[in-house]
Image (spheres, grey):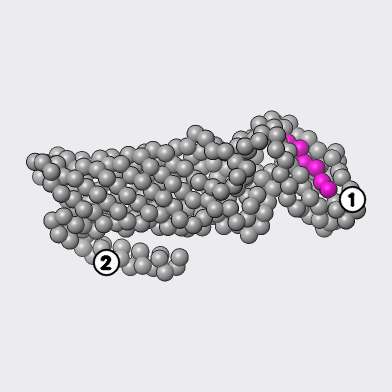
Amino acid sequence: MKFNIKKIIGITVCLISQAMVAQFYVGVQSGIGNIQSNVKETIVGNRLGGALKFGYIYSLTNHIGVGTGLEFSQYKQEVSLNNFSGTLTNYEVDLSTSAFAYNVTTSNYKETQTLHALQIPLFVEYKKNINKGIDFNFRAGAKYFLPINYKINGTASRVNGTAYYPDVNLNIIDLPEYGFGWQSNYSASGEYSTKGSVMSMFELGFTFDMGMKNSLYTAMFLENGYGSILDQDTDKSYIGYNPTSVTDRKANGLYSIHKDAKIRPVAFGVTLGWNFK
């Protein structure tokens, strides 16, 4: 990953030195932003995504150019359990340092996820004039995807946390002062730990001349992430354990239940931009 970052930065600096003869662009993207996961216990719905972007393209020939820039993107989606009354188990340690199995059961649990990220694209553009003032464009390349924050808000009509101590064969189902029992109308916020990854990018569209030095750009885009953007080294309960109360339980998030979960961004939709020289 470090090699990829250095390579992208090096090429970007080289291109900036040629910026005076480049074509600049600003634009927006809108469509489906999907934070895909391999966590089988979850279902995803209501996915939205978008980005603000600016950069420039340096022409190598009449048909080929190399582009780079900076983008700010947002992904937003709702995630829930594929079984609303499902029970998930993780291991915790109480205040006396005794280990136990922490069993969490929820009713109507839903999680709103919002991911903000910076993206640094590096791409090759092929363009061909197909009519007076109209060019066909195809862009392909890669992006370094750097999450800024990945926030979550979890809600449930009821949450129940119980404990099983295997060393003494003891089940605890109702001991609120030690964090075991029911809670109604649960709501809590949290945040995933993240790391950077690489995405592939493709755009297919058209440019329409709007003057001597300005043009309108429209396209369809597809972006696909590789590797996981989550940075976690332990399995966690999606609703955390509070050793002193059944309230104020932390929202760790559904993607925290497997430390090796593969979470990657995927997006597709439309791009609308403005080119100028």
Give x and y (percent) for residue 52.
35, 44
Residue visible at 24% across and 58% down in the picture? 66
- Is residue 40 visible to the viewer in this orientation of the structure? yes
Give x and y (percent) for residue 25.
25, 48
Give x and y (percent) for residue 83.
66, 35
Q: Secondary structure at mark 1?
A: loop
Residue visible at 50% across and 46% down in the picture? 36
* Foreground residue among 130 and 207: 130
Q: Secondary structure at mark 2?
A: helix
Q: Amino acid at mark 2?
A: Cys
Return the residue at label 1. 169
Give, as a single range, the part of the protein colored magenta: 159-164
Give x and y (percent) for residue 160.
76, 37
Left/right placement of residue 32 relative to residue 171 reads left
Return the residue at label 2. 14
Residue visible at 52% across and 55% down in the picture? 228
- Is residue 214 visible to the viewer in this orientation of the structure? no
Q: Amino acid at mark 1?
A: Asn
